[in-house]
């Protein structure tokens, strides 16, 4: 008794077997290999190596995300004004193009490492752990207390890639609309703090902050929020207090 | 989001586990919280493996809905929209139990 095969190349043949009973599916059925591997496992392993380097140097790292133009760099400029004397802060500046943001921060930061993700006309939409690892040699970690990774402005991809941070925060500006938590739930769920920037604009806008907070409460119940204006300085002290609290956290990262 | 680079990661995992044996089918789990477009992932798999040792292998995508567990009333709720609360008692103190998967679960090798 044999078993008929057709191969991908069209050839056919039969196997002749001695009578060994019913072994249907054994000799010729597909062999299944159990795997159970995380598809982003390589990024997660590199992120763990980054975090180990930060921990060894006594540095804590914040991954700061937002849409383009929400005010990450402006907030960091204010942050360096407020904390520059108290904390030695290194910045990893992720930008698709240009050193414009890095140039704004260079005077007051202890160190800035610029990561352009492209070479002229657009590029990566997020920083991953390998890119941040490449930025680390430009940062004297042993001389720093805090590293802020300013991610590429984007509410989708950065949420998926841990870079080895100890805490994740995002900047949101009210001009983006109240419903954004529903449209980008993964981003809004990935952070422990949402910084509502540009609150000095609120008197000029139709935006309903109660609706924003209701959407945020649906998507990420209990997430902390702060209202700030990087332009006027309102609320920046509370944001800096949060950064100081992060620097006092034990080694290791968020889940 | 990054369906093409995900396919490259999947191919790396597949090659490691297949150890040179021809692969017929790759089973992956993609949770609804992973911002992955399944059709795009399958399409990227087809053309990114074309001409390689994995050409002709099928990417079998199992989509995993978002589910939460409520520690207050012990109910499990499958979510169809991003409002993270218990479907039974309304508590927001729920824990996500499914929907964040992004896994290669198994391979089927070609018959020799």
Image (spheres, coloured by chain):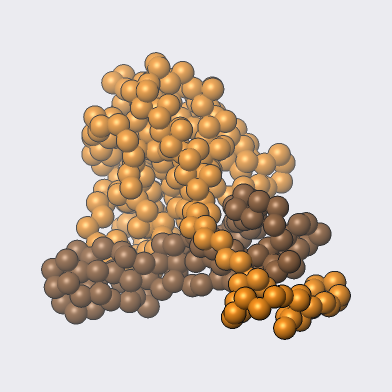
The percent position of residue B28, horizontal first and vertical second, equals 54, 65
Q: Quadrant of the N terminus of chain A?
A: bottom right
Spot the residue most to the front. Answer: A19
Among the chains pictured, the one given orange colouring is: A
- To which quarter of the image does residue A241 belong? top left
Q: Is residue B84 left or right of residue A144?
A: left
Q: Nearer the viewer, residue B63 or A9?
A: A9
Write the residue at 61% across / 60% down.
Answer: B3
Spot the residue most to the top. Answer: A143
Residue A165 appearing in the image? yes
Spot the residue most to the bottom. Answer: A1
- To which quarter of the image does residue A33 belong? bottom right
- To which quarter of the image does residue B11 belong? bottom right
Q: Nearer the viewer, residue A235 or B101?
A: B101
Q: Is residue A6 left or right of residue A229?
A: right
The percent position of residue A226, horizontal first and vertical second, equals 26, 48
Q: Is residue B45 left or right of residue B73?
A: right
Query: In the rendering, what colour is chain B?
Result: brown
Write the residue at 37% across / 75% down.
Answer: B81
């Amino acid at each position: 008794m044999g078993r008929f095969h057709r191969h991908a190349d069209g050839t056919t043949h039969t196997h002749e077997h001695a009578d060994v009973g019913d072994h249907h599916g054994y000799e010729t059925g597909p062999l299944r290999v159990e795997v159970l591997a995380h598809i982003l496992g390589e990024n997660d392993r590199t992120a763990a190596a980054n975090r180990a380097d930060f921990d060894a140097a006594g540095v804590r790292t914040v991954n700061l995300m937002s849409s383009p133009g929400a005010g990450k760099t402006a907030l960091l400029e204010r942050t360096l004004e407020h904390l520059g004397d108290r904390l030695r802060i290194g910045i990893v500046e992720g930008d698709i193009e240009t050193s414009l943001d890095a140039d704004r921060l260079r005077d007051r930061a202890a160190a800035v490492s610029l990561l352009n993700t492209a070479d002229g006309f657009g590029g990566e939409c997020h920083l991953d752990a390998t890119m941040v690892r490449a930025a680390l040699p430009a940062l004297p970690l042993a001389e720093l207390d805090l590293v802020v990774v300013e991610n590429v402005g984007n509410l989708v991809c950065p949420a998926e890639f841990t870079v080895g941070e100890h805490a994740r925060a995002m900047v949101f500006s009210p001009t983006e609309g109240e419903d954004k938590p529903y449209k980008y739930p993964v981003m809004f769920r990935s952070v422990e703090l949402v910084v509502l920037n540009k609150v000095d604009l609120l008197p000029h806008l139709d935006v309903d902050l109660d609706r924003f907070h209701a959407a945020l409460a649906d998507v990420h119940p209990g997430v902390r929020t702060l209202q700030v204006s990087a332009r006027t300085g309102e609320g920046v002290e509370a944001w800096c207090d949060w950064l100081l609290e992060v620097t006092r956290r034990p080694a290791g990262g968020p889940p | 989001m990054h369906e093409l680079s995900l396919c490259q990661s999947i191919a790396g995992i597949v090659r490691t586990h297949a150890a040179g044996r021809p692969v017929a089918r790759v089973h992956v789990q993609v949770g609804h919280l992973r911002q992955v477009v399944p059709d795009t992932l399958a399409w990227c798999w087809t053309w990114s493996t074309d001409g390689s040792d994995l050409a002709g292998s099928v990417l079998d995508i199992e989509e995993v809905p978002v589910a939460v567990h409520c520690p207050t009333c012990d109910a499990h709720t499958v979510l169809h929209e991003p409002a993270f609360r218990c479907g039974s008692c309304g508590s927001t103190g729920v824990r996500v139990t499914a929907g964040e998967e992004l896994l290669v679960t198994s391979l089927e090798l070609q018959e020799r």
